[in-house]
Image (cartoon, rainbow, N blue to C red):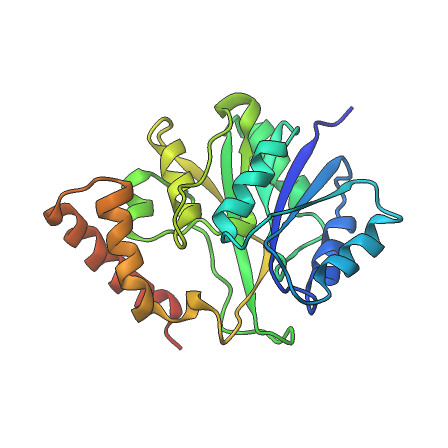
Amino acid sequence: MSPLVSIITPTFNSASYIAETIQSVQNQSYTNWEMIIVDDCSTDATLEIIKKIQETEPRIQLHTLQKNSGSGIARNTGIKQAKGKYLTFLDADDLWMQNSLEVRINFIKNNKKPFVYSSYKNFDEINNVYKKDFIAPSKVNYSDVLKSNSIGCLTVMIDIETLGKKYMPSIRKRQDMGLWVQYLKEIPYAYGIQEPLATYRIRQNSLSRKKTDLIKFQWEFYRNVEGLSVVKSTYYLLNWMIRGYLKYRN
């Protein structure tokens, strides 16, 4: 039997998108998966939509947090529940191509690389193409990720049977990068697939679009999470700012 894949999806007031996101998982050519949805105290119809889909989809689990805690805590709750050989993430407003799981799993198996990620397409809130595709670098190491996090959370696949479970740091932003660097302290590289296997939805009110607001989060990550010196933190922050501008400029 094909190995089980655990898909972690945090939700918060995602009623406008969650059904489409779940559908993109149900459409996968690779079918042995569990989708662990962790709701972070939604106040809209998110829970009702998920519960309705659950009536005919036994592969979906729903967990709810007792207080609003952020996507990192939600993802960690999902990681704790995961039973699969492979671990992957999909936010509640993003989508996968139909072959997304299959291509990433085959890459891991054929190349014996336990940590992979892929390119992805950028769309706006109403599914119009937004900017050009993000093409993933062929491989990145610990230092590369600190300079510019080229690993899209919605494209990651980790062989946790080989690498073990790790958890995201308890911070409000940059939790995903915090998980990637933990693995990259133990393995030399994560490997990129150039084919776009996902669609990232760029929402105008998303914090991820307000780069100036994220400078303090980035600095605090270098200093408080990674414990880097002021000199090294400054070096990486300057790299991050320059590469971020090049990535998101029109």
Residue drawn at x 32%, y 53% is: 148
Q: Position of residue 228 (x, y in %)?
A: 19, 42
Task: Locate the N terminus by quadrant.
Answer: top right
Who is closer to the viewer here, 221 or 130?
Answer: 221
Q: Position of residue 128 (x, y in %)?
A: 62, 76
Residue drawn at x 40%, y 32% is: 183
Q: How many marks?
A: 0
Residue 242 horizontal side relative to residue 153, left or right: left
Residue 245 horizontal side relative to residue 231, left or right: right
Residue 194 seen: no
The quadrant holding residue 161 is top right
Residue 39 horizontal side relative to residue 211, left or right: right
Q: Residue furthest front?
A: 66
Task: Locate the C terminus by quadrant.
Answer: bottom left
| Relative to 105, residue 47 above or below | below
| Relative to 109, residue 70 above or below | below
Residue 138 seen: yes
Q: Position of residue 108 (x, y in %)?
A: 56, 31
The quadrant holding residue 102 is top right
Who is closer to the viewer here, 108 or 157?
Answer: 157
Q: Residue furthest left?
A: 231
Residue 171 horizontal side relative to residue 119, left or right: left
Residue drawn at x 78%, y 60% is: 48
Who is closer to the viewer here, 165 or 64?
Answer: 64
The quadrant holding residue 86 is top right
Q: Position of residue 219 (x, y in %)?
A: 24, 54
